[in-house]
Image (cartoon, rainbow, N blue to C red):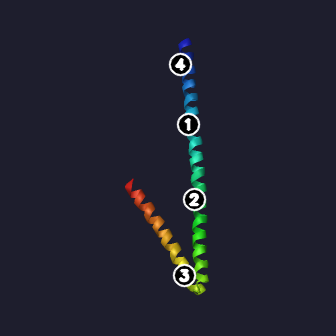
Amino acid sequence: MTELVELFLSAIDVIKAELRKSREGVYELAVIAGLVVCAFFLLVVAFGLIVAGTFIGLVNSNVPVPLAALCTSVLCILIAWSLIWFGRERARRR
């Protein structure tokens, strides 16, 4: 009977150790996910500033506003297409 109790207690110790390890992994994953989300939002803001700067630069260069909007939209489409293409190529390599 004592051996059974010792076996049960050692199993509990193993479970506790595994939970400690998994907590560390979950914490690291949460930190990494937070950093990725923060970087994503900063990247979106950066692209927004690039597009706004392009639009303002074109308007200040005496380009008509509709044409400046068209050029800026084409720039957005090219950036989005290049990001999609890059993501697909990376996914294919895996």
Q: Does the CB distance between marks 4 and 1 fall below 8 Å? A: no
| Distance between the alpha carbons at the discs numbered 1 and 2 | 27 Å
* Picture quadrant where residue 59 is located: bottom right
Name the residue: 56% across, 12% down. 2
Q: Looking at the image, which is closer to me, 75 or 53?
A: 53
Q: Which mark is residue 7?
A: 4
| Distance between the alpha carbons at the discs numbered 4 and 3 | 73 Å
Name the residue: 57% across, 59% down. 40
Q: Position of residue 13 (x, y in %)?
A: 57, 24
Left or right relative to 74: residue 88: left
Q: Does the CB distance between marks 4 and 2 fall below 8 Å? A: no
- Return the residue at label 1: 22
Q: Badge 1: how crowded within 10 Å, few (<14), some, or many (20+)?
A: few
Mark 4 or mark 3, earlier in chain: 4
Mark 4 or mark 2, earlier in chain: 4
Residue 1 shows in this picture: no
Q: Amino acid at mark 3?
A: Leu
Q: Badge 4: how crowded within 10 Å, few (<14), some, or many (20+)?
A: few
- Return the residue at label 2: 40
Q: Give the label, 4 or 1, closer to the camera.
A: 1
- Return the residue at label 3: 70
Label 3, secondary structure: give it. Answer: helix
Residue 54 shows in this picture: yes
Q: Amino acid at mark 4?
A: Leu
Q: Amino acid at mark 1?
A: Ser
Q: Badge 3: how crowded within 10 Å, few (<14), some, or many (20+)?
A: few
Q: Position of residue 27 (x, y in %)?
A: 59, 41
* The N terminus: image quadrant: top right
Q: Give the label, 3 or 1, closer to the camera.
A: 3
